[in-house]
Image (tube, rainbow, N blue to C red):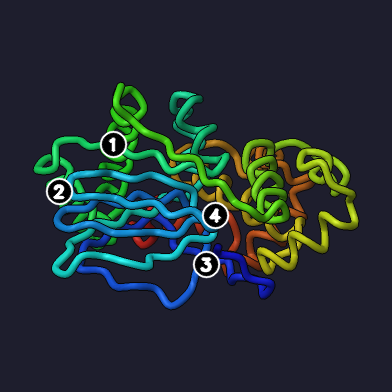
């Protein structure tokens, strides 16, 4: 059983792809991004919230990194491809609801596909995203979206449900999923707690303990992730983006953006046009 009373640091990985041999993890970790693993050779074993999931050669596995996960075993000589995708980008594609809901509710979607084709895709995504060029990131995003749509349509897809024996863990996952799906709406602790069926005070303390973030901090990060995507991929006015992402005023948006991103929304967008910032 994987469960820790100490909060797991919430990592930020962004839109990235890499390939390698992999290694066992000393402990579980969690992050906001959607993650995809391709086993090119060998096999790996994960623990997801206490459930054991094996991914074999030729399989592509997709899951939400907010679920504590730990790579605990892999065959000698295994070669793996990893992809992390901002949650905002994943949700913006409006993929088939069966896949989106399954992943946000803690399932690991697996599919055995065309290994040679998938290996070539991961290699291309790694090159494009490491290039630092916005056009490369846009191309990679289009190809990732197409691959996930193909995964969602495949008849043989399996979705082994993560059966956490810890009710508290499921509560925080429900709260995180609720905020991820309803970030644009005005919401407070009561609405978030109601989505998980717990008392507001308990919700605040539990979420802080498990994620290392307050409910408000998690919601702000989620909203900012969507705002960054819109600044990068649309010509919408900054004010429209601020309100569309759930910020109640332009000043709140600017303050939050500068605090978390180190620059104003306008400067961020200008940097994108100059080719110095990657999309996602």
In what element is the residue under mark 3?
strand
**Is 162 situated above or below 157?**
below
The mark closer to the camera, 2 or 4, is: 4
Name the residue rendered at 17%, 43% in the picture. Answer: 118
Q: How far separated are the C-alphas under marks 1 and 4?
A: 20 Å
**Where residue 156 sits: x, y (%)?**
29, 26
Marks 2 and 4, how far apart at CA = 26 Å
Disc 2 + disc 4, Cβ < 8 Å: no
Is tag 4's residue or tag 3's residue first in the polypeptide sequence?
A: 3
Q: Earlier in the sequence, mark 3 or mark 1?
A: 3
Quadrant occupied by the N terminus: bottom right
Please give the name of the residue rendered at 84% of the width and 46% of the height, measured from the top-left corner.
198
First of labels 2, 1 by sequence position: 1
Secondary structure beneath label 1: strand
Left or right side of 278 for 178: right
- Pointer 1: residues within 10 angstroms few (<14), some, or many (20+)? many
Label 4 SS: loop
Mark 2 or mark 3, which has the lower sequence index?
A: 3
Q: In this figure, which residue is indicated by the disc labeled 1?
A: 111
- Tell which residue pokes out farthest to the bottom in this image: 26
Residue labelled with disc 3: 11
For the image shown, how many numbered marks are present on the structure? 4
Comparing marks 2 and 1, which lies closer to the viewer? 1
What is the distance, in whole Å, between disc 2 and disc 1 at their CAs? 14 Å
The residue labelled by disc 2 is 119
Q: Which residue is mark 4?
A: 67
Secondary structure at numbered mark 2: helix
Q: Can residue 34 be seen in this snapshot?
A: yes
Furthest residue to the left? 116
Q: In front of the other: label 3 or label 1?
A: 1
Which percent across, then down, holds residue 71?
A: 38, 65
Q: Quadrant of residue 254?
A: bottom right
């Amino acid at each position: 059983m994987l469960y820790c009373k100490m909060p797991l640091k919430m990592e930020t990985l962004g839109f990235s792809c890499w390939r390698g041999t992999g290694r066992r993890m000393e402990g579980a970790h969690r992050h906001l991004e959607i993650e995809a693993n391709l086993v090119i050779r060998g096999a790996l074993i994960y623990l997801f919230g206490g459930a054991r999931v094996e991914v074999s050669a030729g399989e592509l596995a997709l899951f939400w990194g907010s679920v504590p996960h730990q790579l605990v075993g892999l065959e000698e000589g295994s070669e793996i491809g990893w992809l992390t995708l901002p949650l905002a980008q994943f949700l913006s594609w409006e993929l088939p609801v069966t896949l989106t809901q399954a992943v946000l509710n803690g399932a690991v979607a697996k599919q055995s596909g065309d290994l040679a084709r998938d290996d070539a895709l991961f290699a291309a995504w790694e090159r494009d995203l490491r290039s630092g060029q916005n056009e490369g990131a846009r191309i990679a995003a289009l190809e990732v979206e197409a691959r996930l749509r193909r995964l969602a349509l495949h008849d043989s897809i399996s979705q082994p449900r993560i059966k956490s024996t810890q009710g508290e863990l499921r509560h925080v996952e429900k709260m995180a999923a609720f905020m991820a799906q309803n970030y644009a709406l005005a919401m407070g602790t009561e609405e978030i707690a109601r989505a998980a069926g717990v008392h507001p005070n308990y919700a605040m303390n539990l979420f802080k303990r498990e994620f290392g973030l307050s409910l408000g901090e998690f919601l702000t990060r989620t909203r900012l992730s969507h705002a960054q995507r819109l600044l990068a991929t649309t010509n919408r006015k900054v004010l429209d983006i601020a309100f569309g992402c759930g910020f109640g005023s332009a000043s709140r948006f600017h303050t939050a953006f500068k605090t978390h991103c180190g620059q104003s929304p306008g400067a961020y967008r200008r940097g994108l046009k100059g080719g110095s910032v990657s999309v996602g």
